[in-house]
């Protein structure tokens, strides 16, 4: 009975060891998702296994992109015209 438990523990540990690592784009996507969830850079780093400086660069680029898109949307809104009622 005891050897079966050891075999099961060994199998579960080996499955965790052979986890497929994320590529660069998947890591960036994961960083953005975690940033949206409100996690800090220090909380994100161990999950995606990236350096803090690269995580901050990804977040800065994402925030800049969002800012530019919001500015573009504001410019695309129809402008209200105000008429001069003082005749």
Image (tube, rainbow, N blue to C red):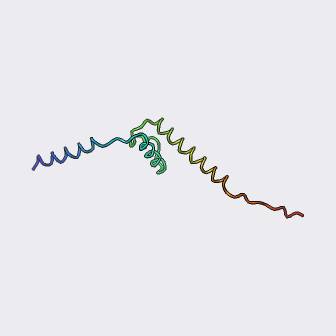
* Residue 57 image offset from top left, x and y in percent: 51, 38
Identity of the residue furthest to the left in this view:
1
Q: Residue at x 45, y 43 (%)?
A: 28
> Left or right: 75 with respect to 34?
right
Closest to the observer, 31 or 26: 26
Number of numbered tags placed on the structure image: 0
Image quadrant containing the C terminus = bottom right
| Residue at figure coordinates x 55%, y 45% from the top left | 63
Rendering coords of residue 25 (x, y %): 43, 42
Residue 31: quarter of image: top left
Instruction: Measuring from the top left, give residue 53's x and y in whole percent.
Output: 48, 35
Residue 33: x %, y % from top left: 45, 49
Q: Nearer the viewer, residue 85 or 6?
A: 85
- Residue drawn at point x = 34 percent, y = 41 percent: 21
What residue appears at the point 88 percent right and 63 percent down from the top-left corner? 86
């Amino acid at each position: 009975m005891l050897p079966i438990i050891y075999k099961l523990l060994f199998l579960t540990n080996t499955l965790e060891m052979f986890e497929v690592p994320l590529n660069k784009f998947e890591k960036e996507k994961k960083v953005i998702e975690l940033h949206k969830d409100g996690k800090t850079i220090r909380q994100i780093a161990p999950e995606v296994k990236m350096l803090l400086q690269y995580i901050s660069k990804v977040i800065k680029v994402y925030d800049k992109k969002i800012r530019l898109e919001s500015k573009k949307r504001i410019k695309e809104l129809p402008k209200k015209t105000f008429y001069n009622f003082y005749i």
